[in-house]
Amino acid sequence: MSLIAADHICVRFDGAEVLHDVSLQIAPGEIVTILGPNGSGKSTLLRALLGILPVAEGRILRQAGVRIGYVPQRLMIDRTMPITVRRFLSLPIRVNDVAATEALARVGMAGHGKNQMTALSGGQLQRVLLARALLGDPQVLMLDEPTQGLDQPGEAAFYRLIEEVRRDTGAAILMVSHDLHVVMAASDRVICLNGHICCEGTPRVVSSAPEYRALFGLGTQGALALYRHEHDHEHRAEDGSAHHHHHDHDTAHEHDNA
Amino acid sequence: MLDDFLVRAGLAAVGLSLATGPLGAFVVWRRMAYFGDATAHAAILGVALALATDLPIGLGTLVVALAMAVTVAGLSARGWAMDTTLGVLAHSALAFGLVAVSYFPKVRTDLSAFLFGDILAVSRADLGLVWLGSLAVVGLLVWRWQALLTATLSEDLAHAAGLKPDRERLVLVIALAVVVAVALKVVGALLIAAMLIIPAATARRLARTPEAMALGAVALGAIAGLGGLALSLWQDTPTGPSIVVVAALLFALCALRRQR
């Protein structure tokens, strides 16, 4: 039973079709990444799923009463509005101090409640947005390019946090991204989008799919191989199966192509 | 007590600031300053309409201000170039209003009362309307407060939370039209936007939360109202502009203090 699903949806802006015949389903507890180049309709798909954008054809199906948390791509808070982190967490549903403190601690922002939202760095703002989304105890967490503007350590830390959230709350995660490598490692399923769904599957399947290569070129293969490798490594630690572990990217690359 | 015109004037100023405080905060947050101008200028056209149809002035103003506000909100939703559109509408409304009003000789002599307000001539009935309108606006804003704030911060966040940003925008549009209608008598069509923006902008420098800014704007608006009344009596200056002068001085004071 999926929590939320798109059933053959098309989305149009001024007659131009941005999404064509897209179907996807999010099951409880899985991490799904929508991957695509700029202008491929990634954010549009997320916004259609959230009900922000109307669909021209097809349907959005939600499990009755499903709780969705949303972390937008970025939040430009006008400097004319004074608002503390604590106050922001209480929008639009008021939460008590205990819950707010706990949510901030979970995302590593303990003690920042009295800070002004406009004074936060990019990474801190993303964490606060995540904390706010978590306060609704979501079954599905939707994140639109959550690590845009973060440096690499910040990005990696944020993805670790997302995985922790999934582990601790069991929430399904639907993430939009155009940064390839870290996403690949963190996802159960990758959907490669370019107006329509080009290919989808596990990170390994997608990264070797010809449609994916056509979209992103072969230049990224080194980085992908590297990160897929780390992914394999984790799995081996979990299931204990012996699998040859390459340290050389190029070797891994050839191996995977074979 | 209400027999004293000064008491009535003071109460009208305080009553108006109850609504202009929180509404002004939204005007500042959403950068609706020109929007406020367009709506306020339409009030003069409303005066002409009321005179032509023998309706009460307040009602004519309310109807035309509401029509203008809804038009502007509709155009902005369709993605018109708002700066230009509002500029056209704001000044056209004023010009049309002034021309229309000139057909009524009685008003012609008294035009400045509509442009700059005539707070010293506020009757008991006027006072009642100011408070009634202000309290209605305050009630509306308090009722929708959480949703309004969320939609102001981010329409996407509001949508995702199941709110309707369009509806919240309409709430502000209606509130603005009501404030324009009741403020006409107090500060006049040309200075209504000033009473929305200046106290809120001043309070911004003193506040850490949206609520503090809105309440601060109420207090600063009331101080400006009473201070302007005093200035007007003392220096025999027009009252509406005097109120705005005091509001502007408070703003300058805060700006200077902050810079040190």
Image: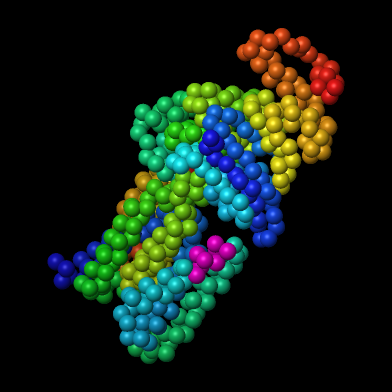
The residue drawn where x is 57% and y is 41% is: A5
Q: Is residue A258 left or right of residue B139?
A: right
Nearest the eye: A95 or B10: A95
Q: On screen, B16 above or below A136?
A: below
The residue drawn where x is 42% and y is 75% is: B64
Nearest the eye: B79 or B126: B79
Nearest the eye: A196 or A166: A196
- Prevailing secondary structure of the magenta residues: helix
Q: Is residue A185 left or right of residue B256?
A: right
In the figure, residue A217 lies in which quadrant? top right
Count of residue discs:
0
The residue drawn where x is 53% and y is 23% is: A167
The residue drawn where x is 50% and y is 45% is: B160
Nearest the eye: A25 or A32: A25
- The part of the chain drawn in magenta is B71-78
Residue B198, position in %: x, y? Answer: 42, 57
